[in-house]
Amino acid sequence: MLSTVTSLHLPPLNHTDSHTHRPNSQNLTTHLLHNFSSPIELKQLHAHLIKTNTPLTSLPLTRIAFVCSLNPSFCYAQKIFKHLENPEILAWNSCLKAFAEGNDPIDAVMLFYQLQSFHVLPDSFTLSFVLKACTRLLDVSNGRVLHGYVEKLGFQSNLFLINMILNLYALCGEVRDARLLFDKMSQRDNVTWNIMMTQLVKRGDIKEAYDLFSRMPERSVRSWTLMISGFVQCGKPKEAISLFLEMEEAGVRPNEVTVVAVLAACADLGDLGLGRRIHEYSNQSGFSRNVRISNTLIEMYVKCGFLEDACTVFDGLKERTVVSWSAMIAGLAMHGQAEEALRLFSRMIQIGMDPNDVTFVGLLHACSHIGFVDQVVNSSPA
């Protein structure tokens, strides 16, 4: 039955029995234990261990977890655990981590419930891996169960776990549960505040989000950016710029996301002065390759009436997205350069860039000035 392991790489010839010139059982087993790399090879190794009466406790469980995560092998992992005598929590955690990060995170949740039948007590790592799986699945029902385990096992002071639960509630839109958990937390870090603020901004509750922001003991660049972006999204560009100026006074350096948000606010207000200053800061900070920043710069210059600057940014782009083309076409149309907008649209089509709805709105605006509306209608997708 040695054929059960023939697809595995065998040890070199010097690992042989001197009488038979065949790999001895011990050396072969040792080699196989450390060299399997696929679910098929794992099953072959399993068969070899059974044939040689080698206990399954010899299996390196961290490698089993990795191999099982390569494809749906939950059932097989389940069988392995059933044949192990009192597998320790470390073994479970290895598999749970692999499943939580694999293609089917539901396997981590299912394996967690299998753990209960072995009367093994989960630790903080166990709960973090299963919470990660629930977050990927947006599975708030099992998330509530895990929340219960966290409290039952006395992990309420584990801020990492509590933040994971808070984030799960927030992502699943469980506003009441998230706020209740947030309010009763005895300690909070920057991550805690940012999770709660993000949820409030997404709901459009900018006033409550700003109230939390004002109460934060420490604010990271992410915290400032969340609030600035929130003001822009809620149609409050003046408040966004005012907060950005406060951020500068506090000595916090803007990141690329901050720059996009502030440029969008400048575009809405027509604040060319601040827009140019942010453009210069972006170049000095090495953000010039960020396409989102470049696209927002084009929009800002267009809305401020400086089409030539918008063209300069567009021409300097090494990578152009459909947003870049659409913003430039719309800008040309807005400033009465309809024929130039049409030429740019033709270039866009020639290079194989597919237009979107925004492109056609800009094109329609351009053609409405020169009587070519039918041409746009015929060009747009059905």
Image: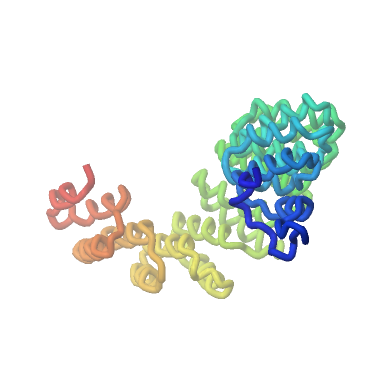
Toward the front, the furthest residue is 19
Quarter of the rendering containing residue 199: top right
Residue beneath the point at 69% across and 64% down = 13
Horizontally, is 53 left or right of 40 in the view? right
Task: Estimate the x, y position of residue 110 in percent, counting from the top left.
Answer: 66, 30
Q: Would residue 317 appear left or right of 335 to someone viewing this image?
A: right
Pick the quarter of the image with the N terminus. top right
Q: Residue visible at 70% across and 45% down? A: 64
Query: Is residue 101 visible from the viewing direction of this image?
Result: no
Image coords of residue 357 (percent x, y):
30, 47
Residue at 52% across, 59% down: 260
Along the line of sight, the residue nearer the viewer: 149 or 63: 63
Front residue of this view, candidates 128 and 310: 128
Q: Position of residue 234 (x, y in %)?
A: 52, 43
Residue 304 rendering spot, x and y as whole percentages: 40, 63
Query: Quick one: 235 or 183, which is closer to the camera?
Result: 183
> Compared with residue 251, is residue 283 higher up or lower down, i.e. above or below?
below
